[in-house]
């Protein structure tokens, strides 16, 4: 990574994204067998990672946890509990920490400064960056990753989402960034509080992707984001209804739920009606001819679920349609985040280093002539350095014939 911390999607250059996705492919390959999994654990062996999530989380929390385990890190965690406020909003407290005694968050984060990596999620925009500044000011070497800060950003999710788009386009091995300039995406749902939308837009905008923001006015992209995107030359269109989309003109859909807990609504029924108006059903997907539908989850009525014992859902839900790419998007989360951790915490370990280590791990025995047996390719054709640690055998296919009980080496 070009930076010590991961706080915004703006930090990811093209070269950084290419490197991350190459590592993602390598990690996926290594995870397919036990030997590869053991080898992968050398990347963060002896390192520690802390997950401090004030807000609830399923995917981001457990995907980072899995990513840390994949790489051999020791993982600690603490999670918050909701507290209702008089104004109708909700905040989250770390009820098992000294925060319940009035502890300053700056002191709390310094108490956690011995972790090699801290993944923080908070309900206030800018909180994670402030905590990173505190650690830097006091000389901690801890890397901080923004796991979501209010209506700000969610950079790791954006990296996962872009990788999913490349997979759908069939250009993962060699990411074709130029091809994205002819691609379009519709962000349907909540663009106001949608931090995943804000981060993915900051990755796609510089690549020339046409972005269509489809939402009711009350949930439209914040004016500050609109000005920023316009100043940076992003290709943006703003629509209010799904029917405003022209069939066949939008390749990808990024659907989001309404962030109910973050709004003060007098009429909760209005929320349900809004979600139903922006619902993605089989009829909508077929009529508008989308290539792929994505969703950061959790979902509600905007993306109906398919249930085996409920026939009514079989006629509405797109879960079993080929356009439904949100489960692939979900499955990629741990692997892409493992690549992110690798690039951030252990950049000195290259893919070639792991490959060489993989070869070294594959040697199981050695002939007295010096040649080594590999579980990958069998006996090595060229003599290897003699090792006193490998079990020895008297002869191998490369040894010469026996004469009076003696081996003639060739």
Image: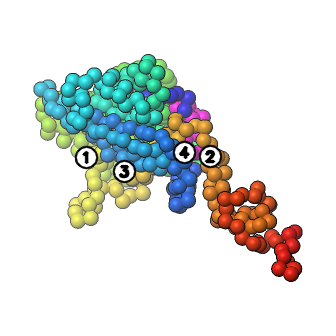
First in residue order: circle 3 vs circle 4: 4
User: Dot 2 corresponds to which residue?
Assistant: 351
Q: Nearer the viewer, mark 1 or mark 3?
A: 1
Magenta stretch bounds: 9-23
Q: Who's the residue at 46% across and 44% down the image? A: 73
Q: How many marks?
A: 4
Camera sees residue 105: yes
Number of the label disc, if any, that sits on residue 43: 4
Between 407 and 354, the one lying in front of the other is 407
The local secondary structure at tag 3 comes to helix
Quick check: 194 left or right of 89? right
Q: Main secondary structure of the magenta part?
A: helix
Q: Is residue 129 above or below residue 255?
A: above
**Crowd class of label 4 (few under 14; some 14 to 19; many from 20; radius 10 Å):** many
Between 88 and 95, the one lying in front of the other is 95
Camera sees residue 289: no
The local secondary structure at tag 2 comes to helix
Q: Nearer the viewer, mark 1 or mark 4?
A: 4
Separation of residues labelled 3 and 2 (CA atoms): 40 Å
Q: Nearer the viewer, mark 3 or mark 4?
A: 4
User: Dot 1 corresponds to which residue?
Assistant: 300
Between 71 and 74, the one lying in front of the other is 74
Q: Nearer the viewer, mark 2 or mark 1?
A: 2
């Amino acid at each position: 990574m070009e930076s010590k911390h991961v706080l915004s999607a703006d930090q990811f250059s093209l070269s950084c994204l290419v490197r991350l996705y190459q590592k993602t492919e390598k990690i996926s390959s290594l995870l397919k067998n036990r030997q590869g999994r053991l080898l992968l654990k050398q990347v963060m062996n002896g390192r520690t990672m802390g997950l401090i999530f004030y807000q609830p989380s399923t995917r981001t929390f457990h995907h980072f946890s899995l990513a840390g385990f994949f790489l051999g890190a020791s993982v600690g965690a603490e999670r918050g509990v909701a507290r209702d406020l008089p104004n109708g909003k909700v905040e989250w407290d770390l009820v098992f920490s000294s925060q319940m005694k009035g502890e300053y968050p700056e002191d709390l984060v310094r108490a956690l400064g011995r972790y090699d990596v801290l993944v923080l999620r908070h309900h206030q925009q800018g909180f994670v960056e402030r905590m990173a500044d505190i650690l830097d000011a006091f000389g901690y070497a801890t890397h901080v990753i923004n796991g979501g800060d209010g209506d700000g950003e969610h950079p790791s999710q954006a990296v996962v989402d872009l990788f999913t788009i490349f997979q759908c386009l069939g250009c993962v091995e060699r990411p074709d960034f130029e091809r994205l300039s002819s691609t379009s995406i519709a962000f349907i749902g909540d663009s106001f509080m949608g931090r995943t939308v804000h981060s993915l837009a900051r990755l796609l905008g510089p690549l020339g992707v046409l972005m269509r923001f489809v939402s009711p006015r009350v949930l439209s992209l914040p004016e500050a984001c609109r000005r920023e995107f316009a100043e940076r030359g992003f290709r943006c269109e703003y629509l209010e209804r799904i029917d405003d989309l022209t069939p066949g003109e939008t390749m990808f859909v990024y659907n989001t739920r309404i962030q109910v807990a973050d709004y003060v609504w007098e009429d909760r029924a209005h929320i349900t009606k809004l979600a139903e108006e922006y619902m993605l059903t089989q009829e909508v997907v077929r009529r508008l001819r989308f290539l792929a539908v994505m969703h950061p989850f959790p979902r509600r009525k905007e993306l109906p679920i398919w249930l085996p014992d409920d026939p009514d859902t079989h006629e509405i839900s797109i879960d079993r349609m080929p356009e439904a790419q949100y489960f692939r998007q979900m499955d990629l989360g741990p692997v892409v985040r493992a690549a992110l951790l690798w690039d951030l915490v252990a950049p000195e370990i290259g893919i070639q280093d792991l490959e060489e280590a993989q070869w070294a791990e594959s040697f199981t025995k050695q002939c007295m002539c010096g040649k080594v047996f590999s579980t990958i390719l069998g006996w090595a054709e060229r003599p290897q350095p003699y090792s006193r640690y490998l079990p020895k055998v008297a002869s191998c296919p490369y040894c010469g014939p026996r004469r009076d009980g003696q081996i003639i080496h060739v």
